[in-house]
Image (cartoon, rainbow, N blue to C red):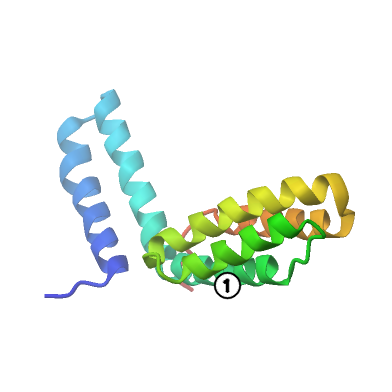
Amino acid sequence: MNIPPADLLRNLALGQALLVAPALGESYAGKTAGTIAAILLLAASDVVLYAERRASFRNRLHQLLADAAPDDITLRADLAALLARVESLPLDDRLDHLLGGLEVLHAFADARDPELARACLEFLFDFAAAERLDPPGLPA
C-alpha cells in the first residue's frame, strides 16, 4: 500500500483532532494535541509544494556555487570538490551540504566581493521566505 504523504498527514491530523484532542479535553495536553493537528494540516497542504521548492533551491544554490569564481584558488578548489561530492550524497543531504558551501563562500564574499555577497544574501532571503508553511486555502 502506498499512501501519498499529503494524505498520510491529513489522516494523522484528523485522528489527532477527532480522537486524541477530545479525549484529553481542555488540559494543556489536549490543547497541545489540537495544535499538533493544526500543524499536521498545514504540513499536509504544503508537502508536495515544499518538496518542489526545496529541489528548486537546491538547484539554484548548486548553480550559484558553480558560477562563483572567487579569486582565492583554494576556495575555488574547495567549491569544485564540494560540488563533485554532492551528487554522491542521498537526496535529502544534498541541500545541507550545499548550504555548508554557501557559508564558506558568503564569508569570503563579505570580505572581498560585494556583488557575490549580495547574490548570497539574495539566495538566503528567498530560501528563508520559502521555508514557511502557508495556511491551507479555504474551498471556494
Q: Residues within 10 Å of mark 1 (few under 14, many from 20)?
A: some
Q: Is residue 98 above or below residue 4?
A: above
Q: Nearer the viewer, residue 117 or 101?
A: 101
- Give x and y (percent) for residue 98: 56, 59
Q: Nearer the viewer, residue 5 or 54?
A: 54
Q: Quadrant of residue 42?
A: bottom left
| Residue lying furthest top | 27
Q: Nearer the viewer, residue 68 or 44?
A: 68
- Give x and y (percent) for residue 73: 75, 59
Residue at position x 31%, y 32% from top?
31
Residue at position x 61%, y 66% from top?
80
Q: Is residue 122 left or right of residue 90?
A: right
Secondary structure found at label 1: helix
Residue at position x 88%, y 53% from top?
114
Judging by the rendered image, the residue that carries numbered circle 1 is 59
Q: Is residue 7 above or below residue 39?
A: below
Q: Quadrant of residue 44?
A: bottom left
- Give x and y (percent) for residue 89: 40, 65
